Image (cartoon, coloured by chain):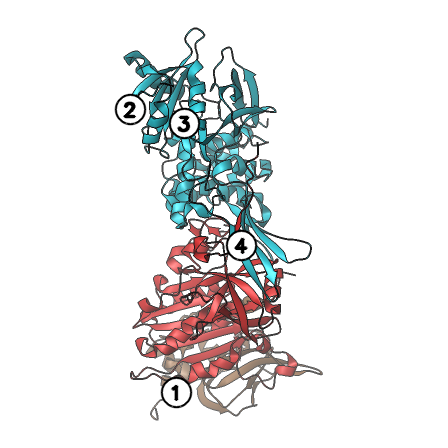
């Protein structure tokens, strides 16, 4: 007998019917961030409702015939556009990076937990990013700028491989310039450090050289009342957490964005499991106390 | 056909010769009947035309890394234990088309398999054991927790819209069974007690001169079907015999799994040297996850035609034993067999509780029988509960089949 | 701000935080307040290492000269950082250059003076050694993290 039933296909698809079906978005803008990283701006092509993403969430991006990868939102445009910053390292990210304006790709999402910005009102905030880790933090930074009065001191610390590997560098001065509206709070501190400066870039580089965590000790004057949001390579985050704890920030106020193999994004495929969590659903943003004992277990 | 109404919860007696009426009634009600069938040298789950397609007179012998069919002395319809396949074969098929995309210039359109409110033909599962009712419920729970409508994962004909479930009491157990430890069997409890709700409960008494069943409806539609089957009220002795049968099966069960505080145990044993010992035997072949009735991991595969214009995405079973399962740009998180076996066992018996509110193991023992090197989770678990020093001494006790 | 003494400057620098009044006074005997113009060297590789620098404002780089490439920066240090530990370890010679990248205010502690005070008062000596060791542990950890080249593409 055959249980392999013929597939009947319907033309009109309501994407909400099946969580694996993406919506089709069209590339409306591209910004080259570094030699291998590009930011894609896209609008939905189906005239459907806008995706309401919160800072720190991710979408599953599909390129026709190639595959699908999770990519965090690096901003949500006021016109409902989505911005994703992609580093060209695998087949799908390369294909995404190669899309031209007017070409389409699939979007499922947004998925996962977000930076708990509302619950941080009244606190000082440290934003710590390593490399591409700044991408999922950028919407959070935009929130901090927009609601500047709601927070205490704000420090943004970015690490990059070299000056040319910085992303969103053109926005740094705007973040820095942002003055508090009413309160006596200080302006936002933005500091960037790189691992190395190639000789030809030496003259133009006025930032720091060193690891990003070395910027922390003199970052915030009231660590006990502060929270931190970290995103970057997991090793960097493990070290950063130790430094932040050393500063006096409570572990439940340290948030980090983890990365695992997200495939289905809805907690059904098992690929992104980390102990009792599915990172796609229970993360990617976790408070440190929720994952403290998991991060140093090898191959968990 | 007699249509004396059958009442839910009332035990009736049915002659073995009338088992055919169950099939014909289900067929008349437009059900496709699926159940155990002899195929090659194993009992698998396939479409059945009638009782004659059941493995009549067959039993089996199972041990760690071993499964053999054996002729029985009688003509029992259900005188064997679980085969390699579980009902997830139908509930979450091994391979499903999610959707198809057709390139149209710079963009593409997506077509998805039609989702009907209910198929033209629904499925009826014949001979579902108590542990399997539990397993179906466990998988259902996974979908519930994920917040996904069940039919997202179910194929085009919406088969999963609750198949008609005919449970059968286990009159015997395999040496690999340990459902009593997991609280999932061998008795068919009241609906919803430990597993998914079901429709009919059968208990077989295969004596030569009086081969008969008891049959009890557990749902409205079960009662509807039962009302078409020739039967009479069971005597008190016959009712007692049902309970005695499962009590006897339970009492004779040889394997046990003891796990009081799973979360604590696994948290404390993540670096236990015994993981290395298991890894030295484990082939990372994924058999255990394929035969497991609750393992639900899937992968999504992309295919495209030669022109590249038509691309499809397929959902298919995957296993945490595969190296690529935990792939993260550049390499896999779980590179060693040690870490992959640890992931499987700690999830199945430990973190599953935290994620889904129950154990992921129903005690069916398939992973023990179908492990090519006979790794037995009940033994491994025991070793993990011992202190590392003791385990070191005990390492030599494993016999490789 | 105008009334800050050298002791205040030392006591308020993270490296000597909570050192205690007695030790601060003691250490201050070795200290002078200094300023370096942009491009000025605080230390030259190979010279006698006779100072510990407490950076108060500005920025310095740890660098080395590579023929054909000029000064190659290894690390930058700023307000609140310290630099210079070669004065404690034989042969007491600088192993890298220290250069001001911008106008930099710092407290310079005479290495020989500090060394003698540490030798003379093992309690102070241990306190200073602990702080130096902690700083070196941090610096080593940072260097190790950078050795990992965490932001590079390692998938190839």
Q: Nearer the viewer, residue A186 or A213?
A: A186
Cα gap from disc 3 to disc 2, whole angstroms: 16 Å
Task: Please say if the residues under marks 3 and 1 sit with CB atoms less than 8 Å apart.
Answer: no
Nearer-N-terminus badge (3/4): 4
Per the rendering, the colour in which chain C appears is brown
Task: Please say if the residues under marks 3 and 4 sit with CB atoms less than 8 Å apart.
Answer: no
Q: Nearer the viewer, residue A108 or B377?
A: A108
Q: Few, some or many C-alpha atoms within 10 Å of disc 4 (few <14, some 14-19, many ≥20)?
A: many
The quadrant in which residue C79 appears is bottom left
Cα gap from disc 3 to disc 1, whole angstroms: 89 Å
Q: Is residue C23 above or below residue C156?
A: below
Quarter holding the N terminus of chain B is top left
Task: Please say if the residues under marks 2 and 1 sit with CB atoms less than 8 Å apart.
Answer: no
Parent chain of label 1? C
Residue B166, numbered circle: 3
Residue A178 percent coordinates (x, y): 39, 83
Q: Nearer the viewer, mark 3 or mark 2?
A: 2
Residue on which disc 2 sits: B7
Cα gap from disc 2 to disc 1, whole angstroms: 97 Å
Quarter holding the C terminus of chain B is top right
Chain depicted in red: A
């Amino acid at each position: 007998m055959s249980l392999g039933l013929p597939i009947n296909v319907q033309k009109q698809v309501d994407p909400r019917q099946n969580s694996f079906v993406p919506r089709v978005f069209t590339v409306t803008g591209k910004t080259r961030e570094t030699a291998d990283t590009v930011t894609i701006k896209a609008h939905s092509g189906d005239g459907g409702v806008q995706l309401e993403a919160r800072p720190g969430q991710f979408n599953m991006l599909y390129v026709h015939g190639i595959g699908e990868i999770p990519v965090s939102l690096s901003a949500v445009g006021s016109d409902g556009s989505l911005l994703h910053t992609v580093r060209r390292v695998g087949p799908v990210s390369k294909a995404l990076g190669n899309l031209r304006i007017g070409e389409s790709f699939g979007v499922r999402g947004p998925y996962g937990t977000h930076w708990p910005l509302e619950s941080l009102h009244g606190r000082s905030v440290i934003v710590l990013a390593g490399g591409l880790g700044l991408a999922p933090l950028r919407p959070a930074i935009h929130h901090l700028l927009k609601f500047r009065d709601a927070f205490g001191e704000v420090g943004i610390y970015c690490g990059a491989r070299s000056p040319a590997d910085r992303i969103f560098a053109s926005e740094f001065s705007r973040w820095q310039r942002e003055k508090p509206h009413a309160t006596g709070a200080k302006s936002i501190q933005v500091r960037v450090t790189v691992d190395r400066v190639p000789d030809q870039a030496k003259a133009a580089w006025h930032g720091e050289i060193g690891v990003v965590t070395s910027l922390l000790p003199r970052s915030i004057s009231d660590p006990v009342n502060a929270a931190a949001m970290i995103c970057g390579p997991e090793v960097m985050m493990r070290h950063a957490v130790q430094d932040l704890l050393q500063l006096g920030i409570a572990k439940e106020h340290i948030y980090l964005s983890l990365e695992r193999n997200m495939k289905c994004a809805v907690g059904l495929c098992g690929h992104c499991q980390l102990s009792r969590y599915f990172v796609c659903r229970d993360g990617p943003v976790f408070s440190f106390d929720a994952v403290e004992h998991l991060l140093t277990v090898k191959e968990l | 056909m007699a249509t004396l109404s059958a009442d839910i919860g009332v035990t009736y007696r049915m002659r073995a010769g009338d088992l055919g009426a169950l099939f014909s009634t289900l067929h008349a009600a437009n059900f496709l009947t699926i159940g155990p069938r002899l195929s090659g040298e194993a009992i698998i789950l396939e479409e059945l035309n009638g009782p004659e397609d059941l493995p009549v007179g067959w039993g089996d012998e199972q041990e760690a890394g071993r499964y053999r069919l054996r002729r029985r002395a009688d003509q029992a319809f259900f005188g064997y234990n679980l085969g390699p396949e579980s009902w997830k074969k139908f509930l979450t098929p091994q391979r499903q088309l999610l959707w198809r995309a057709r390139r149209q210039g710079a963009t593409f359109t997506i077509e998805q398999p039609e989702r009907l409110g209910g198929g033209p033909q629904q499925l009826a599962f014949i001979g579902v054991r108590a542990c399997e009712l539990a397993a179906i419920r466990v998988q259902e729970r996974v979908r519930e927790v994920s917040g996904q409508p069940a039919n997202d994962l179910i194929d085009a004909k919406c088969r999963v819209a609750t198949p008609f479930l005919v449970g059968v009491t286990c009159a015997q157990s395999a040496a690999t069974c340990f459902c009593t430890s997991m609280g999932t069997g061998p008795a068919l409890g009241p609906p919803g007690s430990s597993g998914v709700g079901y429709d009919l409960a059968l208990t077989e008494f295969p004596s030569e001169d009086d081969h008969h069943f008891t049959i009890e409806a557990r749902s409205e539609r079960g009662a509807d079907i039962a009302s078409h089957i020739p039967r009479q009220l069971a005597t008190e002795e016959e009712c007692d015999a049902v309970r005695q049968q499962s009590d006897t099966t339970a009492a004779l069960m040889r394997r046990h799994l003891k796990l009081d505080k799973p979360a604590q145990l696994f948290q404390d044993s993540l670096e236990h040297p015994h993981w290395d010992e298991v890894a030295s035997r484990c082939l990372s072949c994924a058999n255990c996850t394929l035969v497991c009735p609750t393992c639900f991991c899937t992968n999504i595969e992309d295919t495209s035609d030669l022109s590249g214009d038509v691309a499809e995405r397929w959902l298919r079973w995957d296993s945490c034993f595969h190296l690529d399962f935990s792939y993260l740009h550049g390499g896999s998180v779980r590179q060693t067999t040690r870490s992959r076996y640890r992931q499987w066992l700690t999830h199945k018996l430990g973190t599953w509780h935290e994620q889904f509110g129950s154990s992921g193991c129903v005690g069916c023992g398939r992973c023990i029988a179908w492990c090519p090197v006979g790794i037995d989770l009940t033994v491994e678990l025991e070793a993990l509960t011992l202190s590392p020093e003791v385990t070191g001494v005990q390492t030599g006790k494993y016999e490789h089949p | 701000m105008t009334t800050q003494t050298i002791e205040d400057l030392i006591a308020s620098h993270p490296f000597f935080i909570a050192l205690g009044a007695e030790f601060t006074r003691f250490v201050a005997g070795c200290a002078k307040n200094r300023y370096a113009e942009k491009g000025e060297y605080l230390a030259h590789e190979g010279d006698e290492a006779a100072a510990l620098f407490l950076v108060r404002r500005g920025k310095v780089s740890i660098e080395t000269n590579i023929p054909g490439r000029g000064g190659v920066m290894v690390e930058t240090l700023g307000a609140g950082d310290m630099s210079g530990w070669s004065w404690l370890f034989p042969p007491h010679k600088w192993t890298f250059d220290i250069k001001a990248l911008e106008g930099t205010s710092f407290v310079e502690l005479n290495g020989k003076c500090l060394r003698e005070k540490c030798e003379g008062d093992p309690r102070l000596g241990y306190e200073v050694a602990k702080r130096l060791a902690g700083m070196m542990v941090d610096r080593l950890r940072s260097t190790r993290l950078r050795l990992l080249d965490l932001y590079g593409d390692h998938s190839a």
